[in-house]
Amino acid sequence: MDRYSVEFSSKNIIPAHIFKVWDLTSSRMGILVKNNSAILNHLNVGEIMDLKYHAPDGPKAAECLKTEIKQVTKDDEGRFKGHHVIGLSIIDSL
């Protein structure tokens, strides 16, 4: 994966949140959000958001991409215990 973090920012999400992008499977990516994070109130399956992805080259290499929230799953016992796994799917560049 050539993107290592994603930034969520909008008038509804203050302050902006930046999360590490994880390879969930060979074809899916996502982020981990702590169970008590207020941003969970703004992440709904099927919602399409304009997100800023940052590459390893730093902030100048950021790219805005239209992204669909594909999954919001609470992990109570697995590898990511204490977090929600948020599956993301890039639809198109802006």
Image (spheres, rainbow, N blue to C red):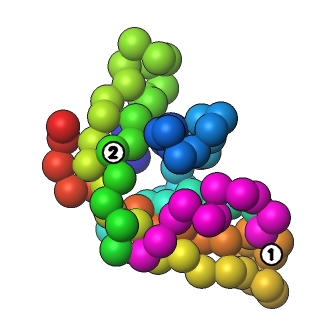
Please tell me in which quadrant of the rendered image residue 39 appears: bottom right
* Structural crowding at the residue carrying mark 2, measured as other residues with C-alpha within 10 Å and reported as few (<14), some (14–19) or many (≥20): some
Q: Amino acid at mark 2?
A: Asp
Mark closer to the chain start, 1 or 2: 2
Name the residue carrying label 1: 81
Q: Specify the quadrant of the image occupied by residue 37.
A: bottom right
Q: Residue at x 33, y 45 (%)?
A: 50
Where are the magenta residues, as a range? Answer: 35-45
Q: Quadrant of the C terminus?
A: top left
Tag of residue 50: 2
In depth, the one of 56 and 84 nearer the eye is 84
Mark 2: secondary structure: strand
Look at the image and tell me whether residue 71 can be seen.
Answer: yes
Residue 38 x %, y %: 72, 57
- Residue 38 colored magenta? yes
Q: Nearer the viewer, residue 34 or 4?
A: 34
Q: Amino acid at mark 1?
A: Lys
